[in-house]
């Protein structure tokens, strides 16, 4: 399609150039026969044609013969056409650039952002939680109306939308997927999710892939294929519903901690990286547990050990374990305690990679 367009434009330019020189040749042949003519060579003819086509019209050179004036009339009409074409072309280019920017074709250079592949109501719910946690989100969708929705409902500095029918490595690179913290595959079917992950892992093998399944039986298959985390929306809903039936207070609390706390009184589960300057760096886990409860009123529930790029979750370890740099501490925390913890850890919550 693009090659055909270039061929067409090239043909038009060639025909216009040939016609231009034919008309100038006719002009020179006729004007040179008149003793008072000023346009009797190519130098003067080209100068006159340029001033005419650009509508400058200095008047230093004018055709005198009848045929010369006919040629001048043609150039005069052509000048209007050229301006109309140029204005239309510039408007078309500006509109195209504006549309490409709206559709996100320029991509983004964000880092440590979440990437969502696919758009639906569930994606909107996930984005709401991520924004509440202060995370940036980049979305790829084949729905143009979804891009309009994203622009209208989310801040541009936090949510980036890109329209694309394809999910090729070139497209994924535009949203800087290799620098993302996690990739949530949110396509229509479980088969599409599996195929997308397998194809993407060939190029981007070190990313964290998160998948939600409609068929929970496929969870072992997805994990074997390389998914980092696989969730079944049906299983999660079933477990929460069952909890509401026989232990409703626990269910209410569980629902609260798996979402972002919306008030200072609500609790949330958060994790923070231990830096070299962190006061808990080098302390025993048990001592950190009591100190965080005393100083911040937060409850330590686990630690993530990071070694050689691998992460291992240890839930409330029974044996003595020392907290070291680049470990992540998991804690149950409310809004008031979060402010105190932030002062101590001096890092944002979540993985910092």
Image (cartoon, grey):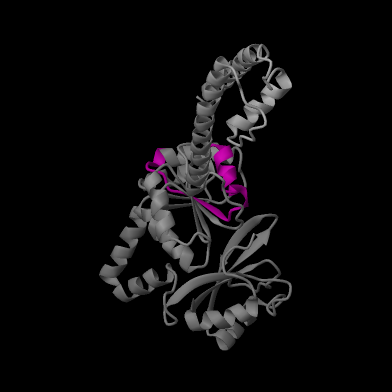
Q: Count every numbered label the image shows and give the total.
A: 0
For the residue pair 323 and 155, the one nearer the viewer reads as 155
Do we see residue 254 in this rendering?
A: yes
The one nearer the camera, 6 or 195, is 6
Q: x, y percentage for residue 161? A: 48, 51
Asked where in the image residue 64 lies, by quadrant, the reply is top right
* Quadrant assignment, res 306: bottom right
Q: Position of residue 60 (x, y in %)?
A: 67, 31
Q: Nearer the viewer, residue 121 or 24?
A: 24
351 above or below 211?
A: below
Could you tell whether 210 is left or right of 49 in the image? left
In the visual, does 268 lie left or right of 303?
Answer: left
> What residue sits 64% from the left and 35% below the top?
58
Q: Residue at x 58, y 38 (%)?
A: 170
**161 is higher (above) or lower (below) than 243:** above
Locate the C terminus and report the quarter of the image it occupies: bottom right
Q: Given the current orientation, which residue lies at the most extreme left position?
A: 245
Give coordinates of residue 257: x percent, y percent: 43, 71
Q: Residue 10 placed where, x, y %?
A: 58, 21
Q: Is residue 55 above or below residue 100?
A: above
Question: What segment carries the magenta color?
Answer: 167-191
Q: Is residue 123 visible?
A: no
Decide which of 19, 269 is in the foreground and name it. Answer: 19
The residue most toward the front is 35
Residue 1 located within the stretch drawn in magenta: no
């Amino acid at each position: 399609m693009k090659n055909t367009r270039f061929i067409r434009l090239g043909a038009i330019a060639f025909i216009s150039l040939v016609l231009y020189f034919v008309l100038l040749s006719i002009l020179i042949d006729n004007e040179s026969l008149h003793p008072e003519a000023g346009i009797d060579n190519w130098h003067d003819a080209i100068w006159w044609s340029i001033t005419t086509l650009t509508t400058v019209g200095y008047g230093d050179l004018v055709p005198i013969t009848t045929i010369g004036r006919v040629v001048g009339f043609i150039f005069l009409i052509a000048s209007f056409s050229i301006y109309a074409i140029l204005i239309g072309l510039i408007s078309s280019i500006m509109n195209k650039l504006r549309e490409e920017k709206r559709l996100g074709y320029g991509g983004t250079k964000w880092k440590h952002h979440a990437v969502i592949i696919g758009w639906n109501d569930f994606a909107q719910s996930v984005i709401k939680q991520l924004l509440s946690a202060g995370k940036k989100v980049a979305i790829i969708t084949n729905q143009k109306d979804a891009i309009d929705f994203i622009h209208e409902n989310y801040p541009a500095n936090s949510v980036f939308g890109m329209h694309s029918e394809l999910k090729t490595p070139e497209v994924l690179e535009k949203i800087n997927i290799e620098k993302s913290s996690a990739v949530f595959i949110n396509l229509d079917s479980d088969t599409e999710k599996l195929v997308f992950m397998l194809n993407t892992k060939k190029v981007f093998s070190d990313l964290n892939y998160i998948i939600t399944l409609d068929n929970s039986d496929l969870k072992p298959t997805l994990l074997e294929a390389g998914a980092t985390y696989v969730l079944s929306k049906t299983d999660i809903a079933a477990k929460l519903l069952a909890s509401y039936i026989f232990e409703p207070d626990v269910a209410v609390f569980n629902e609260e901690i798996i979402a972002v706390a919306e008030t200072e009184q609500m609790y949330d589960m958060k994790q923070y990286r231990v830096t070299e300057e962190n006061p808990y760096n080098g302390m025993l886990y048990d001592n950190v547990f009591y100190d965080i409860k005393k100083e911040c009123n937060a409850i330590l529930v686990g630690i993530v050990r990071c070694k050689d790029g691998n992460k291992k979750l240890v839930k409330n370890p029974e044996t003595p374990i020392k907290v070291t740099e680049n470990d992540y501490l998991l804690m149950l925390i409310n809004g008031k305690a979060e402010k105190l913890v932030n002062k101590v850890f001096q890092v944002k919550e979540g993985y910092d990679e």
